[in-house]
């Protein structure tokens, strides 16, 4: 039996496709929901820095997500809701307390910057397996330039005409199927963004705790640090509603 398993694993490695790898990444163990506090630092081309503090609640691998902004003072109470939907446009809504109104984010606007950061609204969503063309470019790519550890290198090309990207190239760990770093290309095939991701292990789950995004064309960067992470909070689906954005969470 031991030899059969070894042969199966070897066969699987040599026959793995980009879609196989994307499915493995999608199916890795994740908590049912999370709550966290985060700090987002935005560094502009002129060296000027802006710092935002926020609270995040999410469920189903962040397919349902709410974010409330605490700082800076001018942004206090601004809130964001995202509900990803299959076979139809995702629902995204912003609550703007200063104007006492909501602002819907349409599919055509998903390339816009999220709160002035190097993350677009598109970057805030998962990559639906049916909405991308996947290709395994390399099974022995260096995970990091200063490391001998090997990763899978996955190409993901969006099918959506409104996407700001033509391709993402992602370095994926072989043992845990986690994205470690990524290069994203614009519609002309020029390198647009570079991302670095680190994780913290809570129980048996790997949870992202830092994200660095560099816009190589604008020479700006965003650093997100995630703290006070709580998992499996038993959130009901009905809390992920626009009316919830008006109430700053106190739990």
Image (spheres, rainbow, N blue to C red):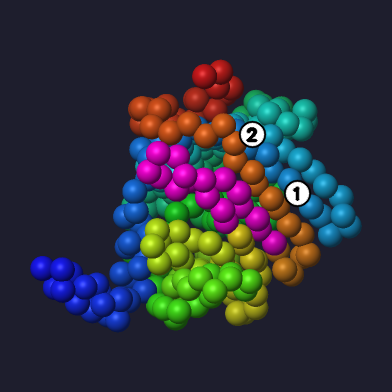
Q: Is residue 45 positioned above or below 31 on the image?
A: below
Q: Is mark 2 on a helix, strand or loop?
A: strand
Residue bounds of the magenta highlight? 197-214
The residue that label 2 is drawn on is 54
Q: Position of residue 203 (x, y in %)?
A: 40, 39
Q: Is mark 1 on a helix, strand or loop?
A: strand
Residue at the (30%, 76%) spot, across then down: 13
Q: Is residue 223 positioned above or below 5 on the image?
A: above
Of the image marks 1 and 2, the number of the one nearer the N terminus:
1
**Horizontal arrangement in the rendering, residue 42 relative to residue 28 (left or right):** right
Find the residue positioned furthest to the left: 1
Asked if one can make out residue 234 in the rendered structure from this viewpoint, the answer is yes
- Mark 1–mark 2 Cα distance, whole angstroms, equals 14 Å
Residue at the (36%, 74%) spot, across then down: 18
Along the line of sight, which residue is nearer the eye, 68 or 112? Answer: 68
Mark 2 nearby-residue class (10 Å; few <14, some 14–19, many ≥20): many
Q: Where is residue 108 in the image (x, y as percent from the top left)?
A: 55, 57
**Horizontal arrangement in the rendering, residue 73 relative to residue 62 (left or right):** right
Q: Which image quadrant is residue 110 in? A: bottom right
Residue at the (68%, 39%) spot, across then down: 39
The residue that label 1 is drawn on is 42
């Amino acid at each position: 039996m031991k030899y059969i398993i070894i042969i199966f694993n070897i066969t699987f490695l040599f026959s793995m496709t980009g879609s196989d790898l994307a499915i493995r990444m999608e199916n890795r163990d994740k908590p049912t929901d999370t709550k966290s506090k985060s700090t987002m630092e935005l560094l502009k081309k002129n060296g000027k820095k802006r710092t935002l503090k926020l609270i995040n609640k999410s469920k189903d691998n962040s397919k349902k997500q709410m974010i409330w902004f605490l700082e800076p003072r001018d942004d206090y109470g601004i809130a964001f809701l995202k509900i990803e939907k299959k076979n139809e446009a995702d629902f995204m809504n912003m609550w703007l307390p200063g104007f006492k109104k909501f602002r819907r984010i349409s599919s055509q606007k998903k390339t816009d910057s999220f709160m002035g950061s190097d993350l677009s609204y598109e970057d805030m969503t998962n990559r639906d397996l049916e909405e991308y063309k996947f290709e395994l470019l390399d099974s022995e790519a260096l995970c990091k330039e200063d490391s001998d550890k090997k990763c899978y290198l996955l190409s993901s090309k969006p099918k959506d005409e409104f996407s700001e990207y033509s391709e993402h190239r992602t370095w994926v760990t072989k043992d845990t199927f986690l994205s470690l770093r990524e290069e994203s290309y614009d519609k002309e095939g020029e390198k647009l963004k570079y991302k670095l991701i680190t994780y913290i292990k809570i129980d048996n789950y790997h949870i992202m705790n830092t994200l660095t995004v560099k816009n190589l064309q604008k020479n700006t960067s965003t650093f997100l640090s995630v703290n006070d992470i709580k998992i499996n909070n038993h959130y009901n689906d009905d809390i992920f509603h626009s009316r919830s954005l008006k109430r700053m969470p106190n739990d």
